[in-house]
Amino acid sequence: MSLMLSETLSTPAIVQRMLEDDSAIHALTRQWAQTLPELMITVARGSSDHAAAYFSYALMSQVGIPSVSIPLSLVSLQQPPLRLKNSWVAAFSQSGKSPDLIDSVHYLHQRGAHSVALVNTAGSPLAAMSEHEILLPAGLEQSVAATKSYVAMLMAGALAVASLADALAIDTGLSEALQHLPGHLHNAAAEDWSPLLGMLTNADKMIVIGRGAALPIAQEAALKLKETSGIQAEAFSSAEVRHGPMEIIEEGYPVLVFAPSGPEQPGTLAFAAEMRARGARVLVVAPRGTVCEGLLPSVPTAHALLEPFTMIQGFYLSAAQLAEARGRNPDQPRYLKKVTQTR
């Protein structure tokens, strides 16, 4: 069994530990509730940036605080005169060692922002630079392909949004739904996604589709397909793909669609059907029971915002198997290393 596969299988236990010890997140959100941030800025790269995008979507959709991802070169290299009174920066990182993340948090501090680091490595320079630290309990991640640390970041974001909503007396139902998430993640391992291997074992390019809370999952899936299987996979919103990219989708072209419940689902499923009629090979990840052709079933959750968790869990399990089917080692991509330090 690959490390990627075994680490993915460990995520239900990690999520359970985060539910049992969420004191650092509650302390942070109590501070947010006292002086509500007017703006949340996220800084991250790679898989961590996809987790940050999920957090931003959840924060805006459930609580209404604007949240944006800022280009790291803008703050680490150009240092513009940003005005950040009553703003926060949330830095997401597995290692907490990347110089551009550290420099960005330092500069945003200087411009008036408060900060929190969400990291999976104790004693990191990024956490030392930040006012608050959320130390993720994913433990040492040995596979170069991030899996359990990514899900832990998703969970930290969801817990923070749920806790803040509760503190503000906003009834989202998210806190209660999160209590059932470990079991849902465990059940994801029983779903049959073998059609994905059939579609992608010999593929060299594809498109991955998502919208809303599913777009960060689509972006993460596309990254993992590049990292572990060498497939040129690109992620798009099911709306944005119509503004040009769908021109390359022709007969036989592989398309993977993430379609969780919610207002985005009908349009996403309609796009999948349109591409299938064009002759594309289309698989749709959607909650079990969704009526559509080419369904890869994901485990339903108690809140639509949590469906991306079981979707990415099912995907990771299949991605590890796919890499091996293509003769690759998912734990050791050829040109990558675990800690990437950029400026």
Image (cartoon, rainbow, N blue to C red):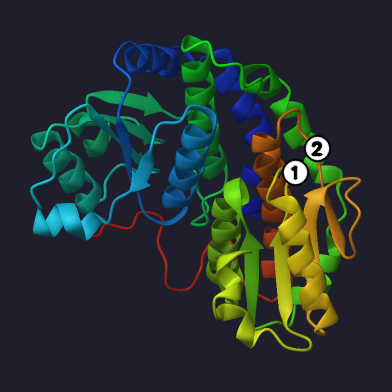
| Left or right relative to 129: residue 33 | right
Mark 2 residue element: loop
The amino acid type found where label 1 is placed reads: Ser
Could you say where residue 56 lies in the image, as x and y percent from the top left? 45, 40
For marks 2 and 1 on the same chain, the one whose residue lies earlier in the sequence: 1
Q: Based on the displayed image, in which of its 4 quarters is residue 194 positioned?
A: bottom right
Separation of residues labelled 2 and 1 (CA atoms):
9 Å
Image point 10% across, 59% down: which residue? 78
Image point 65% across, 45% down: which residue? 8
Image point 30% across, 34% down: which residue? 39
Q: Report the disc number at residue 166.
A: none
Could you say where residue 37 lies in the image, as x and y percent from the top left? 31, 25
| Left or right relative to 201: residue 59 | left
Q: Which of 163 and 267 is in front in this view?
A: 267
Mark 1 residue element: loop
Q: Mark 2 points at which residue?
A: 300
Could you say where residue 255 lies in the image, as x and y percent from the top left? 72, 73
Q: Which of 287 and 197 is in front in this view?
A: 287
Give neighbour class at mark 1: few <14, some 14-19, many 20+ (Cα, 10 Å): many
The amino acid type found where label 2 is placed reads: Pro
Q: Name the residue under label 1.
A: 261
Vertical comparison of 2 with 195: above or below: above
